[in-house]
Amino acid sequence: MNILKSKVAIVLLGFVVFEACAKVPITGRRQLNLVSEGEMMAMANTQYAGFLGENQPLPAANDNVVRVRTIGEKLAAAATKFLTDNNAANRIEGFDWQFNVVDDPTVNAWCMPGGKVVVYTGILPVTQNDNGLAVVMGHEIAHAIARHGNERMSQAVTAQGLGTALSVANDQNPTLVGNIFLQSYGVGSQLGLLAYGRNQESEADKMGLVFMAMAGYDPREAPKFWERMSAGGGAAPPELLSTHPSDGRRVADLNAYMDEALKYYKP
């Protein structure tokens, strides 16, 4: 009986792992997400509302908000079309896109699972124009669609010994789980996770180029944007110790992929 139970457990585990494995759109990389996307979206809703409660978003009539939402809606529509055309529409199932701007000098933007986007005013001078803003937003939207946060969350909760039932772990230690969720979009503390983060960043760059091109924004602005980031960003950490590729490496990779991205560009 014990042998039978063990065999059943192995079969079920194999099924779960198989179901958790998926290919990332465009790059085709296989990923292993052990946390359900439903749990990730539920946590994103909570964390997003909490962030906006502590960081008052600019009003809808603000010019920057209008720009961000216009570009965001075009990018979301382009991503939806790409995924639908490539039999990957399940990637955005349950998404409820929201685009907000906060008045903060930090040079930053991010997108949580479910399409919850925030752009900081501090990054707008670096974007310079709508194409530049589409570079940033397309990249962050790509992170959400590729479920990179889920990958990093899966790694983190496993490393903390919390298992993969996020709801259970959240009941046991909500502060820790909340912090892990937020850190899943930032810098990890272990070198083993850092290289993984760099791969995700490069992946989001490629996906973002395609999405912005399909939305009618010139992908050739992407290398220019990262050159501006490099010029104005001060001393950057060594690439080995950063979750993001160095700006020079990123520009080279973007240029190498540009011909493919331009196939989708229809101004």
Image (cartoon, rainbow, N blue to C red):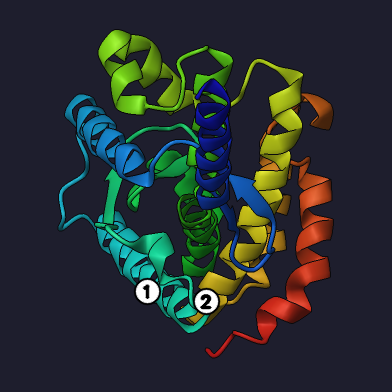
In this rendering, the answer to whether 173 lies above or below 236 is above
Residue receiving disc 1 = 74
Q: Nearer the viewer, residue 70 or 25?
A: 25
Q: Nearer the viewer, residue 129 or 8?
A: 8
Task: Choose top left, top right, bottom left or bottom right for residue 187.
Answer: top right
- From this viewpoint, is residue 256 visible? yes
In this rendering, the answer to whether 163 lies above or below 118 is above
Give left or right: position of 39 versus 188: left
Q: Amino acid at mark 1?
A: Lys
> How far apart are labels 1 and 2 at the CA level?
10 Å
Residue receiving disc 2 = 217
Residue at 25% over, 14% down:
171
The circle on residue 54 is none
- Mark 1 or mark 2: which comes first in sequence? 1
- From this viewpoint, is residue 186 visible? no
The extreme front residue here reads 1
Residue at 22% over, 40% down:
57
Residue at 36% over, 33% down:
104
Q: Give percent across and percent down for residue 24.
A: 60, 59
Mark 2, other Cα within 10 Å: few <14 / some 14–19 / many ≥20: many
CB atoms of marks 1 and 2 within 8 Å = yes
Residue at 75% over, 62% down:
254
Task: Choose top left, top right, bottom left or bottom right for residue 66.
Answer: bottom left
Q: Amino acid at mark 2?
A: Tyr
Q: Give percent across and percent down for residue 89.
A: 41, 71
- Tag 2 secondary structure: loop
Task: Choose top left, top right, bottom left or bottom right for residue 152.
Answer: top right
Q: Give percent across and percent down for residue 158.
A: 54, 21
